Amino acid sequence: MEHIPFPSWPDVAADLIAVATGRTPAQTVIKGGKWVNVHTREVLDGHDIAITHGRIACVVPDASYCTGPDTEVIEAQGRYMIPGLCDAHMHIESGMLTPAEFARAVIPHGTTSMFTDPHEIANVLGLDGVRMMHDEALLQPVNIFTQMPSCAPSAPGMETTGFEISPEDVAEAMAWPGIIGLGEMMNFPGVSNADPKMLAEIAATQRAGKTVGGHYASPDLGPAFAGYVAGGPADDHEGTCEADAIARMRQGMRSMIRLGSAWYDVQSQITAITEKGLDPRNMILCTDDCHSGTLVNDGHMNRVVRHAIDCGCDPLVALQMATINTATHFGLEREIGSLTPGRRADVILTSDLKTLPIEHVIARGKTVSINGEICVDCPHYDWPDTARQTVNMARDLRADDFRIAAPKGANAVTANVIGVVENQAPTKALQFELPVTEGRVQATGEVCQIALVERHQATGGVVNAFVSGFGYEGQMAMASTVAHDSHHMIVVGTDADNMALAANRLREVGGGITVFKDGVELALVNLPIAGLMSDSPAQEVAAKADAMMEAMRACGCTLNNAYMQHSLLALVVIPELRISDLGLVDVRTFEFKPVIETHT
């Protein structure tokens, strides 16, 4: 299916004027609503919105003068008319869905604009993968703007990806029609140290007049942070406390505060607005990562806005943070983010601003959802075999591949262990005393084993280490080809035989997530596209994801959204301790650490 560009404001200005002045009837009129104006933070009773060519011609108390016999009239019936919601920073792949199915899942929740960074698929398929995501995004009935991934690998020298992104790739992508800017610049040490490659990517974006996304995952707000801001990133979503949000806003960045499936960073940062009284224009709401179960069962940006309100934010301010603030940040204030003339007619009808029921969604002037039911098609891209055959392992694995040998003569060891932190992206660098049996280190108590299996170049590499915090019991294993950001295969388990079964199962099916207990598969989520996504409907994927999380609970794990924690164990740009195909990485120093520190 060919992408047909949406008509620009100049393309249809004459027709907008004709409708606004009453010389021509509107194609659609939304009649009798409360106009939520995010420019002035007002609610104005008794207004109509006249629409033509998918854009707003006028918002007036009575649009009967530009309503003709063929005008579609949508009765607002006194409900609030709010702008379609914008997600300022997100990864479609984290939904386990393709752009088409992600759009289908979130449209009923009122999301009409997304700013997506497909750096997950970039790590697996390179620029070709980004182009596939970009091309499917442009086919959708809502606005999906693509940020060109900046960091594949995210930490050069610390991991090996399937492909690398170069400054030349970035410069090429800046000319694509759906590219809005540069994806999150995760190599924050590289920027602070003026790495030529990172600065070249930023320069290519700035010279194209587009926005540079940020990612400063460090608590250090001293010279390193100052250097990062001076390098050019314009926003950051990695803050976890009020001081982080304030520091970013004071330096002219946008503080993006996120509520994803596992990231609960709104409550701790929105106090900069609700308690400190800072100007909210530079704070933006986003999701970052939401898996399909969250999208289907809980919502998307409507969930984030409701949460911000529950945290004490004025509903109109919360709406600004999910509409006009986002549009302004990306240079699209004259295109999306408000219900004002010339803008795309992305409108939500809701009966309550606090609980925010999404009752009627209009995108580009067309009804796309009513009362949670989607009313439009979301076209699919024809994904080639190269995107569906990406689990490249040299051979089936054996239990011996997952055993960690102890130093000769050791009876016990002190091991460096990754510590999972519930509801947060950072981990802890921990140490545990672990016993040795028959020359092998045993994971006991709250510690279990983690392995990273190389799956891009079929090297046969397996890196083993330890992790704590999942609470697994008995003989089990969980494996996933979703392993941010390099997306090799992560296997976590208490038993080497089950770990081998889980890894080999994903090799067999071409990617996804599986859980084994006592040699039996409890759950499988098939993700055939790049080992990251499914092109099945969101409800089907969500049902499998729910079964996967239930299987994790059956293995003793009680963490909230533990799958998201699992998928980030290889994310070597967020402190403190991570695993890569090259070893155990201390992200505080960007140095490798031994798995076994000492022994007795």
Image: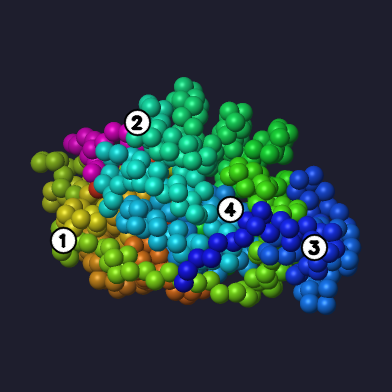
Spot occupied by residue 372 in the image (x, y as percentages of width and height): 65, 72
The answer for how far apart the CA atoms under marks 1 and 4 are is 40 Å
Name the residue carrying label 1: 394
Look at 24% across and 56% down and name the residue there: 456
Q: Nearer the viewer, residue 132 or 524?
A: 132
Colour mode of the rendering: rainbow
Please say if the residues under marks 1 and 4 sit with CB atoms less than 8 Å apart. Answer: no
Q: Amino acid at mark 2?
A: Pro
Residue found at x 80% / y 62%: 19
**Disc 2 target residue:** 196
Q: Residue at x 75, y 54 (%)?
A: 341
Q: Report x, y in % for residue 122.
A: 36, 53
Say which quarter of the image contains residue 600.
top left
Q: Which of the two discs, 4 and 3, sits closer to the camera? A: 3
In this view, the residue in front, 390 or 417, is 390
Foreground tag (2 vs 4)? 2
Q: Is there any visible trace of residue 419 in the rendered image?
A: no
* Quarter assignment of residue 583: top left
> Which mark is nearer the camera, 3 or 1?
3
Residue at the limit of the structure toward the left, as seen here: 408
Q: Residue furthest top?
A: 223
Would residue 242 appear left or right of 538 to someone viewing this image? right
Q: Position of residue 549 (x, y in %)?
A: 44, 65
Give residue 19's mark: 3
The stretch in magenta equals: 582-600
For label 4, the residue is 87
- Residue 52 image position (x, y, % from top left): 73, 65
Checking the image for residue 211, the label placed there is none
Which of pointers 2 and 4 lies earlier in the amino acid sequence? Answer: 4
- What is the distance, in whole Å, between disc 3 and disc 2 at their CAs? 52 Å
**In-front residue for pair 336/413:** 336
